[in-house]
Amino acid sequence: MRKQYQPQTSEIRLSSVLHALSDPRRLQIVLSLKDEAEESCTIYHDLMPKSTLTHHLKVLREAGVAKVRIEGTQHFYSLRTDDLELLFPGLMTSVLNVKPELIE
Amino acid sequence: MRKQYQPQTSEIRLSSVLHALSDPRRLQIVLSLKDEAEESCTIYHDLMPKSTLTHHLKVLREAGVAKVRIEGTQHFYSLRTDDLELLFPGLMTSVLNVKPELIE
DNA sequence: CCTATTGTACTAAAAAAGTCGAACAATAAA
DNA sequence: TTTATTGTTCGACTTTTTTAGTACAATAGG
């Protein structure tokens, strides 16, 4: 369990962020992180198999949308809200406040 | 040259909008429409072949990001700024104001 | 040390997206 | 009516993405 690459703030790109957010399952994950400081991966295991979840979290991480803090064997995910607000002011606010019926 | 389907405002979905915006070439098109009321397709023919352009404009149209007005054989494209602002307040503003070096 | 928990890596298959040439359709203009 | 302009449709091909099973790695606890 190594690497867990996450881009520096200066490496985050809009195309990648929008791509990461455009998948319905990833958008669902992102929205569920809205009000949580951090969230362990296990809560999503009802929604999809572990390996699929790993894939989506990796896309979010590598795009710079989410970050992870590792504690023992548990991974706690959270949004990089501050970085994203700095780079793309207003973007995450508008995405996170989308009306549920307009998501997909 | 018929159909040119464009969704009603109530049919526009965030996933589709984000997907449409996530491709670098489409994002480039969208940004070029920022300050233009309307723009004919011909100006993009340096950037890509006609059929590729048609494809990308179709994705933007069907997602509800752009609309077209047909005049003779010319198609004039513009952004559905008002509709998008109504559905996803602040989203397009943040995308359209991205710093060029943060696009891709 | 043994075992359960948590999540990654690898792999393969299927689905979706992007690219673009060539033929076609509609209009405009000569 | 013939020709040029503008853009679509079709089809083929390539690339990327998504999905998910299986095996593996790291840590925690008994």
Image (cartoon, coloured by chain):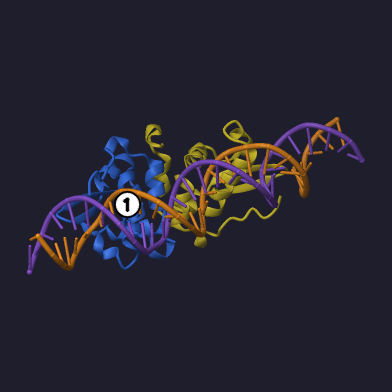
Chain colours: A yellow, B blue, C purple, D orange
| Residue on which disc 1 sits | B93
Against A49, residue C21 (above or below) is: below
Q: Position of residue A63 (x, y in %)?
A: 52, 53
Coordinates of residue C6 in the picture (x, y in percent):
69, 38
Front residue (pair B51, A42): B51
Q: Residue at x 40, y 37 (%)?
A: A103
Query: Percent from the top left, x then y, of residue A100?
Result: 40, 33
Please give left or right for residue A72 compared with residue D17 in the image.
Answer: right
Position in image of residue B61 (x %, y %):
30, 47
**Residue at position x 43%, y 41% from top?**
A96
Q: Horizontally, is C8 left or right of A80 in the view?
A: right
Q: Amino acid at mark 1?
A: Thr
Quarter occupied by residue D2? bottom left
Give the side of residue A53 with respect to residue D4, left or right.
right
Residue under the image location 60 percent in, 41 percent down: A52
Pick the front one: A21 or A38: A21
Q: Is residue A75 visible?
A: yes
**Helix or strand or loop: what does disc 1 sit on?**
helix
Residue B7 lies in quadrant: top left
